[in-house]
Image: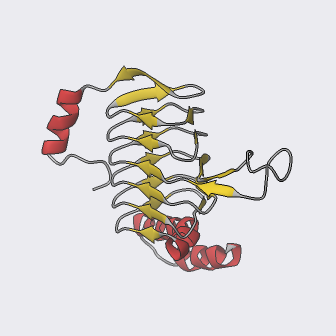
């Protein structure tokens, strides 16, 4: 991939328009960062990959989301809604070891997959860990470094380990912007 990026950089160097040159490099960087996700997951139109992204083949990312760096581990399904913003180094776990199957210590040979759902218009901060079975409802904001387990309610601002809602967005303003279709990235 580095060689391909070098070739694009050289070719772009021959373009006299600086803005067009930067746009070409940015488009290639987005493609390169999201190549694995596009290859394995179900990625909708308009998704922008700003950082390296690794997903499984059961991952769906909605339209006009921005992914700055995401790793999905395990074989469980992941649904990311539309117009989501995901900061760098976000980790989504979709599988747990079965520690009660009784055949070995500290855990047995079985594992359990659990679906992770991130609804529309969610903003997830840097280095957030999302555990199997978590659900982040529409419009929620997850503070950097949080560990999400269970359900985060709509419009909540949550943080900590485990992540708990400590504030709420202005619901009236959110709904007003939503009605006007004033979405970031569209």
The residue sitting at 59% across, 53% down in the picture is 94
Q: Is residue 70 above or below residue 160?
A: below
Residue 69 or 82: which is nearer the viewer? 82
The residue sitting at 22% across, 34% down in the picture is 174
Task: Estimate the x, y position of residue 180 in percent, counting from the top left.
Answer: 13, 45
Q: Quadrant of the C terminus?
A: bottom left
Residue 127 occupies quadrant? top right
The residue sitting at 13% across, 43% down in the picture is 179
Q: Quadrant of the N terminus?
A: bottom right
Decide if residue 46 is on the left or right side of residue 76: left
Task: Estimate the x, y position of residue 47 in percent, counting from the top left.
Answer: 40, 62
**How many numbered marks are there?**
0
Q: Is residue 104 above or below residue 128?
A: below
Task: Estimate the x, y position of residue 67 in percent, counting from the top left.
Answer: 49, 54
Residue 66 or 11: which is nearer the viewer? 66
Q: Is residue 51 above or below residue 2?
A: above
Most extreme residue toward the top, as rendered?
166
Q: Is residue 33 above or below residue 12?
A: above
The residue sitting at 57% across, 56% down in the picture is 51
């Amino acid at each position: 991939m580095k060689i391909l990026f070098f070739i694009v950089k050289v070719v772009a160097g021959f373009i006299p328009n600086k803005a067009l040159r930067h746009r070409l490099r940015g488009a290639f960087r987005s493609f390169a960062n999201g190549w694995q996700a596009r290859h394995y997951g179900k990625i909708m139109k308009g998704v922008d990959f700003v950082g390296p992204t690794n997903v499984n083949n059961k991952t769906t990312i909605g339209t006009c989301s921005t992914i700055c760096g995401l790793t999905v581990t395990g074989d469980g399904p992941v649904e990311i809604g539309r117009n989501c913003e995901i900061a760098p180094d976000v980790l989504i776990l979709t599988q747990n070891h079965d520690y009660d199957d009784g055949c070995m210590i500290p855990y047995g040979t079985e594992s359990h997959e659990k679906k992770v759902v991130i609804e529309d218009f969610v903003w997830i901060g840097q280095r957030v860990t999302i555990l199997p079975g978590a659900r982040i409802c529409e419009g929620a904001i997850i503070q950097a470094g949080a560990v999400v387990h269970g359900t985060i309610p709509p419009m909540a601002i949550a943080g900590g380990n485990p992540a708990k809602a400590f504030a709420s967005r202005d619901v009236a303003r959110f709904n007003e912007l939503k009605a006007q279709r004033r979405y970031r990235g569209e």
